[in-house]
Amino acid sequence: MTLLGHDAAWREWHKAMAGDRMHHAWLLAGRRGVGKATFALAAARELVGADGQADQHPDIHVLSFAPKDDKEERKRAEGKSFELARSIRISQVRAMQSRLSTRPTMGEKRAIIIDPADDLERNAANALLKSLEEPPVGTYFLLVAHSPARLLPTIRSRCRVLRFPTVSDNEMDRLLTQLSPGADDATRSAAIAAAAGSPGAALEFVDMELGKVAQEMRAILDRGDPDFRMRGTLAGLIGGRPDRNRIRAVLELARSVVGQRLENNLSDPRRIIDTHSELVRLTGEQPTYNFDAGLLAMEIGTLLANAATASERADG
């Protein structure tokens, strides 16, 4: 199945496959949740002529987040839930490179998928660069990147870029209606606004039931929160022990809510711009920081309350 917005990428990929000299490194760039990893696996399967699941083929290797430490590795081995590392480590790249000294197992080509490449450790990125500079014959790299600017310029310069666009709100609404028919209007609206054109993110927001979180954020922006009660409600809706995905989704939702307010409030936008900038900073720190859920919820609520104060002055 071709996902929304993938037609141009497939045309470029198929044209390259049909050519005499296919480029050895591809950068799949686009917002998180637009289906880049799905494309990478399907493209790799075509490349090596695989049948069945791509990640089970001996000539398709996927580097992603591994267990955080030996304790979490043992949990995985025992079939238990385990915590992932926050980056792709140099040991993983070295293990992949050791395989490149041999020929592909079942044909003349192999595919290396790195997802997400923008979360490579610095040393891991430097090690990967050596393989990109001197790629073994028949080896092709597909680097999935949500934020390509975080990659080393020397890595970006060695890759051919495939861009994956976001989709329109109307397309998103049709998709959510089809795939999440039980979602109410508030949840669907919040998902579309927060996902900013990313179908995967929108579906994730629906699954997390963030509609009430969005309503509370907008209420704080509308009325402020002089007695801190609404901030307490917001913290309860976010949850006492949210995982990393939920924290990321909440931060992106807050950014979206403030961004919408900025579009409708041009009289005195400075405080709202400052609030949005702080939310961008928090979102950037989220992959590597261990946030206390309660404190993070209060910080988000305080930023929204400050923006509400700015709105009142502008409207008055």
Image (cartoon, helix red, strand yellow):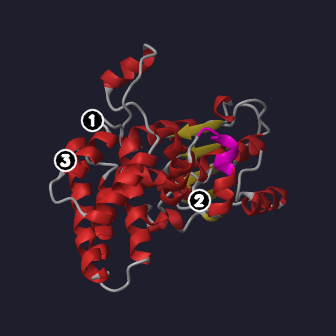
Of mark 2 and mark 1, the one earlier in the sequence is: 2
User: Can you name the residue that lies furthest to the top here?
Assistant: 78
Q: Main secondary structure of the magenta part?
A: helix
Q: Decide: is 171 above or below 293.
A: below
* Residue position for label 3: 295
Q: Say which of 203 and 79 sits in front.
A: 203
- At a point 49% along the width and 49% down the height, the residue shown is 116
* Residue position for label 1: 240
* Residue position for label 2: 27
The quarter holding residue 162 reads bottom right
- At a point 38% along the width and 84% down the height, the residue shown is 266
Of mark 2 and mark 3, the one earlier in the sequence is: 2
290 lies left or right of 165: left
Percent x, y for residue 37? Answer: 60, 47
Of mark 3 and mark 1, the one earlier in the sequence is: 1
User: Can you name the residue that lies furthest to the left here?
Assistant: 227
The residue stretch that appears in magenta: 175-182
Q: Say which of 17 and 227 sits in front.
A: 227
Of the residues shown, which amino acid type is indicated by label 1?
Gly
The quarter holding residue 158 reads bottom right
Examine the rendering and report whether any part of residue 195 can be seen: yes
